[in-house]
Image (cartoon, rainbow, N blue to C red):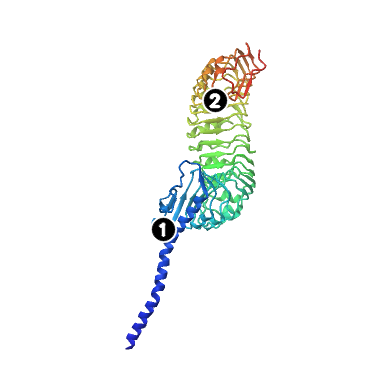
Amino acid sequence: MGLFSQLLVHFALLILLLLPLELHYLLIGVSSVTLSITTDREALISLKSQLMSNETLNPLSSWNHNSSPCKWTGVLCDRLGQRVTGLDLSGLGLSGHLSPSIGNLSSLHSLQLHNNQLTGPIPDQIGNLFSLRVLNMSSNIKIPEDISSLKKLEALKLGRNSLYGAIPASLGNISSLKNISFGTNFLTGGIPNDLGRLHDLIELDLTLNNLTGTVPPVIYNLSSLVNLALAGNSLWGEIPQDVGHKLPKLLVFNFCFNYFTGRIPGSLHNLTNIRVIRMASNHLEGTVPPGLGNLPFLRMYNIGYNRIVSSGVRGLDFITSLTNSTQLNFLAIDGNMLEGVIPETIGNLSKDLSKLYMGENRFNGSIPSSIGHLSGLTLLNLSYNSISGEIPHELGQLEELQELSLAGNEISGGIPNILGNLLKLNQIDLSRNKLVGGIPMSFGNLQNLLYMDLSSNQLNGSIPMEILNLPALSNVLNLSINFLSGPIPQVGRLTSVASIDFSNNQ
């Protein structure tokens, strides 16, 4: 046998020896694909075993060994059907807890479990989901011990849980984060400076926790922020006057219910696209800065319960400026030290305006009749000012009105009969004024009324039987401290009213 033939034989033998090894690796490759989807199936079956549903038809009934997970409720697979990439079980009424097997779904990009009733901690194995980009577990459970290993995470939504302790500073290491929502929990401590490294952050929602301290200046440098919501904590310090310049993309600015001091930043009024400005219940001082006329898309402006004053004869011009905000739905300036006559231009505010809070200030003069043009109003509160004059009949045009409070003023004259046309009214408080005359019989039309307080006026005559038969009246009927006369009436259908007071009449 020649040299070439010997080499050929040796080569052939080598091929025969290596072939089983190649087949072995080939089979491993094939079985790894099968094993991956099989592992995903087993992980999901294990997950199902720890979950329960209150629904008559179990929403996870399709999860069984006889079909591909890619066909199961809430499961999303890749294009080849080889791995589970998404799991959306939101709002299915599930209870129970998460199985540690969730960590075996290693190709998962999105995990949506919000709006269920899950309990217990998130398994540590969730840290194995290195491809996870969206984690939404609002209204469920506790925060994982270590979440910073999820390097691709873009959205972290753990609102309405029972989270406690400090916000992990390690979140600042997840540079891909765009949304952080930890609202309505029990988080304590301060806002970590490390969050200032999240330069792509769009949403930071830490509302309704127990956070303390000042807002780190680096937070105001996150120029990508669209939603900055820190309401309902114990944060303090001054809000930077240039916050609107540093956060030019802001659509929502919510700093309510804290201890912030200083003045309202005028730069917020330069954000022409902003939708929501909320700074109520702080310790802010000074006047309302100019520029409110620049906000055509503004829907909510809430600066109630601060120490805001109006200065000079044009101190209430900001109300007129808001007429340019044609989408305004909510305006609250109550609980301040604003004074002067409410301008007639208030009637030019948005027809979409639903709630108008102006109580507990120092307004004087009469109620502008133009308020009757605000046809979308469901709530009007002008209580506890120094308003005088009569109740304008135009208020009877507010057909959507559900709550009317004019208490604690110096309003005189009679109660207009036309208020009986407000058929959607469920609360009326005209107490502590100087109203005279009788209680309108037209109030018998207010079939949805839950609360009526006409006390501490100078009303006379008898109590109309019509209001004693109002079917919905269940909270308060207070007619005390007037000059009403006649026998104490039978309360008719008012057997369920929590408080009835006819005292101190004639």
Helix, strand or loop at label 2? It is loop
Q: Is residue 416 above or below residue 337?
A: above
Neighbours of disc 2 within 10 Å: few (<14), some (14-19), many (20+): some
Of badges 1 and 2, the one in the foreground is 1
Residue 376 image position (x, y, % from top left): 49, 28
Residue 332 image position (x, y, % from top left): 57, 33
Marked residue nearer the N-terminal end (1 or 2): 1
Q: Choose between 444 and 220: the one closer to the eye.
A: 444
In which quadrant will I find the C terminus?
top right
Q: Is residue 14 above or below residue 237?
A: below
Q: Choose between 61 and 398: the one closer to the eye.
A: 61
Q: Choose between 296 and 94: the one closer to the eye.
A: 94
Task: Kindly identify the residue that appears in the image at 46 percent across and 56 percent down.
Answer: 40
Say the numbered circle drawn on residue 360: none
**Residue pushed farthest right?**
504
Q: Amino acid at mark 2?
A: Asn
Helix, strand or loop at label 1? It is loop
**Residue 107 visible in the displayed image:** no
Residue 121 image position (x, y, % from top left): 58, 51
Say the numbered circle drawn on residue 426: 2
In which quadrant will I find the N terminus?
bottom left
Q: Is residue 482 above or below residue 194?
A: above
Q: Which residue is mark 1?
A: 82
In the displayed structure image, the side of residue 156 where residue 26 appears, left or right: left
Q: Amino acid at mark 1?
A: Gln
Quarter holding residue 22: bottom left
Residue 377 image position (x, y, % from top left): 51, 28
**Residue 476 visible in the displayed image:** yes
Neighbours of disc 1 within 10 Å: few (<14), some (14-19), many (20+): many
